[in-house]
Amino acid sequence: MGNCCSDVGGGMAAVGGTAASAVTGNQNDAVDMFFKSRGIHGLFSQIELSFSASNLRNRDIFSKSDPMVVVYIKERDGAITEVFRTEVVLNSLNPTWITKYTITYHFEVVQTFLFHVFDVDTQFHNVDVKMLKLEEQQSLGEACCALSEIVTKPNRSLTFDLVRREESVTATHSQHRGKLTVHAEECFSSKTTSEMVLRCSDLESKDLFSKSDPFLVISKLVESGISIPVCKTEVLKNDLNPTWKPIFLNIQQVGSKDSPLVIECFNFNSNGKHDLIGKVQKSLADLEKLHSGREGESLFLPTPVGHDFQNKVLKSKLFVDQFSETVQHTFLDYLAAGFELNFMVAIDFTASNGNPRLPDSLHYIDPSGRLNAYQKAIYEVGEVLQFYDADKRFPAWGFGARPIDGPVSHCFNLNGSSNYCEVEGIRGIMMAYTSALFNVSLAGPTLFGHVINKAALIASQSLANDARKYFVLLIITDGVVTDLQETKDALVKASDLPLSILIVGVGGADFKEMEILDADKGERLESSTGRVASRDIVQFVPFRDVQSKSSSQSKGGEISIVQALLAELPTQFLTYMRSRDIKPST
Amino acid sequence: MESKSRTLEITILSGEDLRIDNKSVKKNAFVDVSIDPFNCKTTKMDGEGGSNPSWNDKLVMDMPMQTRFITLAVKCKASSGEKTVGLARIPVTDFIGGYSPETCLQFLSYRLRDPKGLKNGIINVSVRVKEPLHACSSQAAAGLGIPIDGRNDFGVVTGIPIWSGYPSNSFFR
């Protein structure tokens, strides 16, 4: 019952960026909405960056420098935009700035920042920092890094040597320009989560021949009066007194404990037009009161009377059976405690990709340097994940090809080695991929079982060694799996491991069947022996959706679907850790 | 391989979408766990969950080495007596010798089949294999208090009594 809220999704499309545009930083409404339309919440954390520096260069003659930090966001195409200025600290070469920069951390995008330290001349000291003309100030140096580099540091602090842009790298060693330390702190509010069990009584039957199939949608109201869905329950079949599974609402998702929430009860219809059974408007605080008073709140239904709507109060009631608040460890807490995400990649070398030497092949390496679909997918996913992998050594495999003189292999090491599968960095994957294209002959069929088993084995070995690792396997393929049942069996078996699998389909094949593997869109995966996946570990996306968008993506506005899928990883990571009660602290 | 049985900690977590004759189970669902006909345990009855009961009942059972399957029978008590909702057979190989180290807590879910063989709901359990109960006499004294490696190959087993302070969550410190 994954995507049954098409009506809500449609309504959301009209919302645009009104809700959250107050937050600075890379705004990511596209992903946000994509998830909400599927009833999933991306993982967003508010982060506060604070700055300090040591041994800055002295540019003033009669006193010390008066430094200020300016923060820029660096886009993929290299364009930089100023986003923040600290205050000016007077006469200090070891300043600690008070003003903090708050941004939203997005797991799925590489958020690159440029920090530039200026010495502000005395004559400007009574000017507001926002009004200062930077070209009139002296530069004390700058530093550049990705936000993920800061948050993956154990103490969430990163210290860089400041450099001057015009200087060549070799010249810097003679002149020290001091160091800048950036510290990232997660805002506390995002850690509080309310858990509720909601129940309704005496719902009306909306179906002709059976009882209603109710589900709840909880939305927050924003200033413009539009409601934005934040949470959705499962559909319970044929139930007029339903109790849904516990709902988790993060305080941050709803704004505050007192912000009004609209709770709507719908009758599920497979055609996507769900009938509203009734609704209530309550804040989290109200819901808590309902729980402590053990009272029910009557649902109402807007009913047309003439030209107007009147709220008809129904017999049906909403109860809050459980209400508790917990402070949950966030993804960043785990990172700080040394947990890692390890990236693995498997590439389809079946013959259906076409002869790699011909330009119409999906594997064609363009001499002009334009990336093919496989390279793009590796790059887009790898670029984000590499920061979360400490040694940056990635296992890389190919499948569905015949290595020189051998039989068809469904899992061979991309680097051509017979005993180790790891390559160095994203560049290593790219190089191993290109060289593999020359060293193997494409064959078939398309079997995933072997690579999934191999990845699962690595994950289980890490588990046995007590390692704080979670694995992400990226499978890039041009076609439908031949061994659907075998793949399902392998996935079900691996569902209990610290492993997520991302399948990206390239080319024009019909990937309908692949969606079965993605449990978001249907039932839980079931193996041939009757075992069921203990959680959803697979995400599938056809890459063509992405390609059409990636051209405009460099402009900064749009986010590709691959990134949207990546955004789900922290949630899968947390589900795994929480279900096993693994805590980030030692 | 002297030991004849190991201790199994099986937690019956919850059921999903349980039905009897295509009608949702109202209440009083429980689970019979049997390793063999003489080695059965039963969970408590679930009063509130209806067709999605949650038991969270931890059963500690002895499992002989030669055991191949564990049978879970979800039943429901009604005025007319006990009815079987569905059965699931867990192959022991799903949690011993699979991917996960066997002494690690493993979460498993199974599709239930009713007595006619038709698909019913899903049952979620977690399993942890404790160190074997027996064959620990001589080594046990020396082994007390010494942290043990929880990842023995299952060919060779170190006999450590279960009361030797092996913390249940030691796998994820």
Image: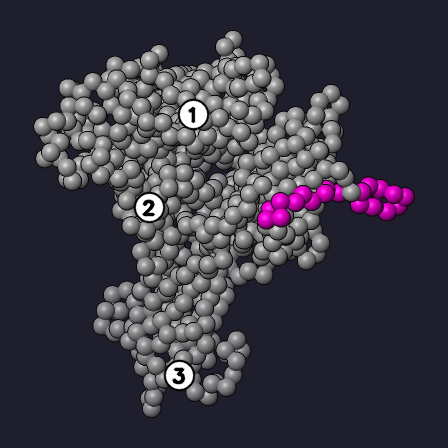
Nearest to the observer: residue A282 or residue B63 = B63
- Residue at disc 1, secondary structure: loop
> Looking at numbered disc 2 in the image, what kind of residue is underneath it?
Glu
Q: Is residue A301 placed above or below A530 in the rendered structure?
A: below
The chief SS type of the magenta part is strand
Q: Is residue A495 placed above or below B66 in the rendered structure?
A: below
Residue A295 among those drawn in magenta:
yes
Determine crowd level at label 3: few under 14, some 14-19, many 20+ residues with C-alpha closer than 10 A. some
Discs 2, 3 touching: Cβ within 8 Å = no
**Callout count:** 3
Q: On the image, numbered disc 3 is attached to which residue?
A: A90
Q: Where is residue A426 in the image (x, y as percent from the top left)?
A: 33, 44
- Residue at disc 3, secondary structure: loop
Q: On the image, numbered disc 2 is attached to which residue?
A: A340
**What stretch of residues is rendered in magenta?**
A291-312
Residue A435 among those drawn in magenta:
no
> Looking at numbered disc 3 in the image, what kind of residue is underneath it?
Leu
With A37 as the anchor, is B38 left or right in this view?
left
Nearest to the observer: residue A427 or residue B69 = B69
Residue B160 appearing in the image: yes
| Res. B5 mark | none
Image quarter for residue A267? top right
With A130 as the anchor, is B9 left or right in this view?
left
Q: On the image, numbered disc 1 is attached to which residue?
A: B43
- Marks 2/1: CA–CA distance: 38 Å
Residue sitting at the far top: B116
Q: Which quadrant would the N terminus of chain A be assigned to in this image?
A: top right
> Looking at numbered disc 1 in the image, what kind of residue is underneath it?
Thr
Badge 3: chain ID = A
Q: Which of marks 2 and 3 is in front?
A: 2
Q: Position of residue A443 (x, y in %)?
A: 36, 20
Badge 2: chain ID = A
